[in-house]
Amino acid sequence: MSVPLPYFLSLSALLFTIGVIGVLIRRNVIVVFMCIELMLNAVNLTLIAFSSALGDINGQALVFFVMAVAAAEAAVGLAIVIALFRNKQTVNIDDINILKW
Amino acid sequence: MTFEPLLFFFLAAMAVTTAVLMIVHRNPVVSAISLIGNFFCLAGLYLLLRAQLLAVLQIAVYAGAIMVLVVFVIMLLNLGDEESPAFRLGFRTALGTGLAIGFVLEMLYLFVLTPFTEPLRRDVQAGSGVGTVEAMGAALFSRYLFPLELTGMLLLAAVIGAVILAKKRLT
């Protein structure tokens, strides 16, 4: 690995922060959902970088499970978005506040 | 071996650019396509880290399955551009964004300026065969067999749950 490990970690921190900022500033629930996917991917990059630097398979096995859980989360999350849109005719998260008090 | 840093910087710049484009663009379809580009850049980075199986899975699962689902839902809901104030700019949002930027600056400071990861770079040869399909399969079907089976159950439950949630009416 001729690229040093801290470069990968810095890129991962940058991508994670972009995802956090996206969750904070966007109002469309699908874009917020995609920002969460971006954060998951940033963490995956960290895990693979450490796994590759240490020569250890466990980090990559964890990334495999993260991907499987992300797929399940995408299916259920988008079904919830469809159910919400059918009930409220909106995907704006400012209008979806029935769990807020 | 000298082209690896060049490739890294190219892919990293593309990944950050597509990520920023995703969160600033008003049209959700453009956001989704930017995210697909971001996933391809990350797959290239995984190849740089010698994680071949995960690079293929990244493209097949993320850029293939998940993003097709997202684009399909965007089409199904017929979403156009967001209304004129695309961003929420309240006090709490500004505070959270400031804290996030402070966090990333602190992380960059830790990663780049402190040499605490120096001993991690030594064992390059040990990591050469780590990410192959053979090594991953051996790990997944021996040590991680039980979590792997649980993942299958999780996916089955997610499929059933998604169908029930998205159905028009329960009978």
Image (cartoon, coloured by chain):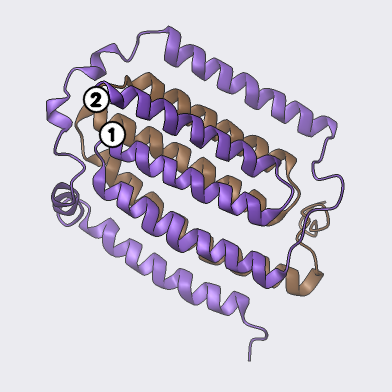
Chain colours: A brown, B purple
Q: Give the quadrant of residue B120.
A: top left
Q: Amino acid at mark 2?
A: Met
Report the residue at 52% width, 59% height from top.
B67
Compared to residue B128, the image places residue B124 above or below, namely above
Residue drawn at (30%, 26%), measured in percent from left and top?
B4
Q: How many other residues sit within 10 Å of disc 2, few (<14), some (14-19) or many (≥20)?
A: many
Q: Position of residue B53 (x, y in %)?
A: 25, 50
Please state if B44 lies on the left or on the right of B119 as rendered: right
| Of A61 and A45, the residue lying toward us | A45
Indicate the quadrant containing the N terminus of chain B: top left, top right, bottom left or bottom right.
top left
In contact (CB < 8 Å): disc 1 and disc 2: yes
Which residue is rendered at x = 50% and y = 35% of the image?
B14
Left or right: B73, with A70 as reference point: right
Image side of residue B129 versus residue A88, left or right? left
Between residues A38 and A61, which one lies in front from this camera angle?
A38
* Residue in the image at 85% along x and 34% along y: B90
Q: Position of residue B57 (x, y in %)?
A: 33, 54
> Residue A1 got which mark?
2
Chain under callout 2: A
Q: Position of residue A6 (x, y in %)?
A: 38, 19
